[in-house]
């Protein structure tokens, strides 16, 4: 499988941390050229240097995925630098505020939807023409277990992640005959800085513990375990897979 990634040009958003960082490192180790995209410039440059020091190929682009011009420029810079676009891992996201729906600040609602849902739309809007020009490609959008089920105190996040799944399915059927595959990765509870930032209230702490206790495998996943699902979907090893939802969650969604 890894050899099918050699020399592919792949954009990874949210590449400065967590699941995106792990995916970028893995993809680069398989010989892909990586465009690391993130709002966190310091950390993004660090990941870029790590890849280059290990002999891999990467550039960093400062991008806010909620800003259309940033996303357009990200794709333009990819084509300018590498001449094509073969894959995209649209993974940047922020966490929920862990409060009941009626207490959610409307500004926070718009901010989260802007990054977690509109950001995925904008990425695909600009990536797809570049892929069509190159004869095809593979897109993986990061949703969540919470794109399929609900837990208390997460309405804005759940709405966005359900939306990512809908958008993924829609794009999969729109481009299935044009050699662009579009799939969703559904991480369960994953050990990343997002999880470390943690819930803000006692009720939310209890909820996270409740969710962790419900994982059939009895542990949270690592960023690298989750990233490997994206690596497979981006590779030609998954050439007949489109419109699918890949849970990487220790069995959480099966119970
Ligand atoms: N960690 C989990 O338990 C978990 C579970 C399910 C789904 N997810 C999803 O996985 C994805 C990655 O999360 P993670 O756990 O690795 O989190 P993380 O916080 O470690 O990494 C997220 C990255 O996204 C970047 N980012 C945030 N807003 C951005 C923006 N507007 N534009 C560009 N980059 C931006 C951050 O700077 C950060 O580098 C997210 O979409 C998240 O919702 C995480």
Image (spheres, helix red, strand yellow):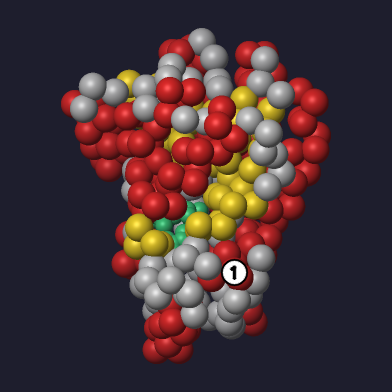
Is 219 situated left or right of 67 in this image? left
Q: Nearer the viewer, residue 67 or 234?
A: 234
Visible residue check, residue 2:
yes
> Would you place residue 129 above or below residue 223 in this image?
above
The quarter of the image holding the C terminus is bottom right
Position in image of residue 107 (x %, y %): 58, 64
Residue drawn at (76%, 23%), measured in percent from left and top? 178
Mark 1 residue CB less than 8 A from any atom of ligand 1: no
The kind of secondary structure element at disc 1 is helix
Q: Position of residue 221 (x, y in %)?
A: 39, 62
> Residue 45 at what x, y percent from top left?
27, 34
| Image position of 91 with respect to 159: above or below | above
Identify the residue under disc 1: 253
Closer to the camera, 181 or 100? 181
Horizontal relation, residue 176 to residue 54: left or right:
right
Residue 237 quadrant: top right
Q: Residue at x 71, y 44 (%)?
A: 243
Relative to 244, is 240 above or below?
Answer: above
Q: Residue farthest to the left? A: 53
Residue at point 42%, 29% (across, down): 2
Q: Is residue 75 shown left or right of residue 196? A: right
Q: Position of residue 75 (x, y in %)?
A: 54, 24
Residue at (43, 17) in percent of width and height:
7
Q: How many marks?
A: 1
Is residue 88 something one can see in this rendering?
A: no
Query: Local crowd at mark 1 within 10 Å, few (<14), some, or many (≥20)?
Result: some
Closer to the camera in the image, 202 or 179: 179
Q: Nearer the viewer, residue 164 or 183?
A: 183
């Amino acid at each position: 499988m890894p050899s099918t990634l050699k020399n592919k040009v792949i954009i990874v958003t949210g590449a400065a941390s967590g699941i995106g960082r792990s995916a970028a490192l893995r993809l680069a180790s398989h010989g892909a050229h990586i465009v690391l995209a993130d709002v966190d410039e310091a950390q993004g440059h660090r990941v870029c240097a790590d890849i280059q020091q290990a002999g891999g190929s990467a550039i960093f682009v400062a991008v806010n995925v909620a800003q259309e011009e940033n996303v357009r420029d990200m794709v333009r810079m990819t084509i300018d630098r590498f001449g094509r676009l073969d894959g995209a891992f649209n993974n940047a996201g922020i966490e929920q505020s862990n409060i009941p729906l009626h207490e959610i600040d409307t500004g926070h609602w718009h901010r989260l939807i802007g990054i977690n849902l509109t950001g995925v739309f904008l990425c695909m809007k600009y990536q797809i023409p570049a892929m069509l020009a190159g004869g095809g490609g593979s897109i993986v959008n990061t949703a969540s277990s919470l794109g399929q089920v609900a837990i208390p105190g997460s309405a804005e996040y759940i709405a966005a992640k359900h939306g990512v799944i809908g958008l993924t399915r829609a794009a999969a059927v729109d481009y299935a005959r044009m050699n662009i595959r579009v799939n969703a990765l559904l991480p369960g509870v994953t050990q990343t800085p997002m999880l470390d930032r943690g819930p803000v209230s006692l009720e939310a702490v209890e909820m996270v513990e409740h969710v962790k206790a419900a994982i059939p495998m009895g542990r949270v996943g690592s960023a690298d375990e989750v990233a490997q699902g994206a690596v497979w979907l981006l590779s030609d090893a998954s050439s007949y897979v489109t419109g699918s939802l890949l849970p990487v969650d220790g069995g959480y969604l099966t119970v």
